[in-house]
Amino acid sequence: MAQERIDLTNQFLIAMPGMADDAFAGTVVYLCEHNEKGALGLVINKPISLTLGHLFAKVDLSLDREELAARPVFYGGPVQTERGFVLHEPLDEEGGHYNATLAVPGGLEMTTSRDVLEALSNGAGPKKLLITLGYSGWAAGQLEEELGRNGWLTVDATPEIIFDTPIEERYERALGLLGIDPRMLSQEAGHA
């Protein structure tokens, strides 16, 4: 029997306690794309030791905005960890467009081209953003299989959790969107 097609684009994937994969334990993933070919998302609550200031220096760009320079870069997932992904608020027509931007239907935008960094270096660019190294990817049917094994909870994403919530509170706040207290979650799957 064919599985009913689900589309989790613009949703959070929230790792269940006991997630066996260390790369995803305790994570919240923003899904940028989910279709019959698979899924692509960015982890939004795992900062790494690199700051945006250091990242910009590595790519020979200056970043004079102190509030941005001190922000952490995030671990976006285990795929292409040397590549940067910029998750940002949708830009209006005057905000410009970048060479490689994926507009998430009903949600944010994800840009992978250097021109967004250049815009930020020049004092322009998106005001609300999160930069990751790497992304999280699932082959066709893989995410659906993980959902079937109770590996993830899903809920409609809210930009406030990504951009305005302290990093250490993002997991609990995402669960809160479902009305769940993390202390109430069991690590064991239930079987009746």
Image (tube, rainbow, N blue to C red):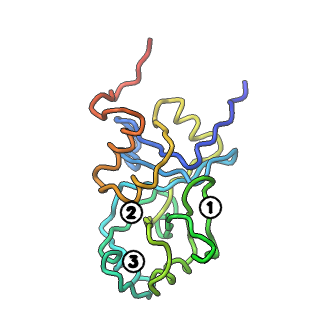
Q: Amino acid at mark 1?
A: Ala
The x and y percentages for residue 150 are 47, 30
Q: CA distance from mark 2 to mark 1?
A: 20 Å
Quadrant (top left/top right/bottom left/bottom right) for the C terminus: top left
Q: Between disc 2 and disc 3, whose residue precedes?
A: 3
Q: CA distance from mark 3 to mark 1?
A: 24 Å
The x and y percentages for residue 36 are 70, 44
Q: Residue at x 50, y 77 (%)?
A: 125
Label 1, residues with CA under 10 Å away: few <14, some 14-19, many ≥20: some
Q: Between disc 3 and disc 1, whose residue precedes?
A: 3
Task: Confirm or deny contact between disc 2 and disc 1 (CB under 8 A).
Answer: no
The x and y percentages for residue 55 are 39, 77
* Picture layout, residue 86 above or below residue 106: below
Label 3, residues with CA under 10 Å away: few <14, some 14-19, many ≥20: many
Q: Amino acid at mark 3?
A: Leu
Q: CA distance from mark 2 to mark 3?
A: 11 Å
Asked which secondary structure carries label 2, the reply is: strand
Residue placed under numbered mark 2 in the picture: 74
Q: Between disc 2 and disc 1, whose residue precedes?
A: 2
Please give the label number shown on residue 21.
none
Give the left or right position of residue 66, taking residue 156 as reference.
left
Q: Residue at x 57, y 34 (%)?
A: 145
Asked which secondary structure carries label 1, the reply is: strand
Residue placed under numbered mark 3 in the picture: 55
Res 107 → quadrant: bottom right
Residue placed under numbered mark 1 in the picture: 103
Q: Residue at x 46, y 35 (%)?
A: 151
The x and y percentages for residue 137 are 55, 52
Res 46 → quadrant: bottom left
Quadrant (top left/top right/bottom left/bottom right) for the N terminus: top right
As drawn, which residue projects farthest toward the top?
192
Task: Confirm or deny contact between disc 3 and disc 1 (CB under 8 A).
Answer: no
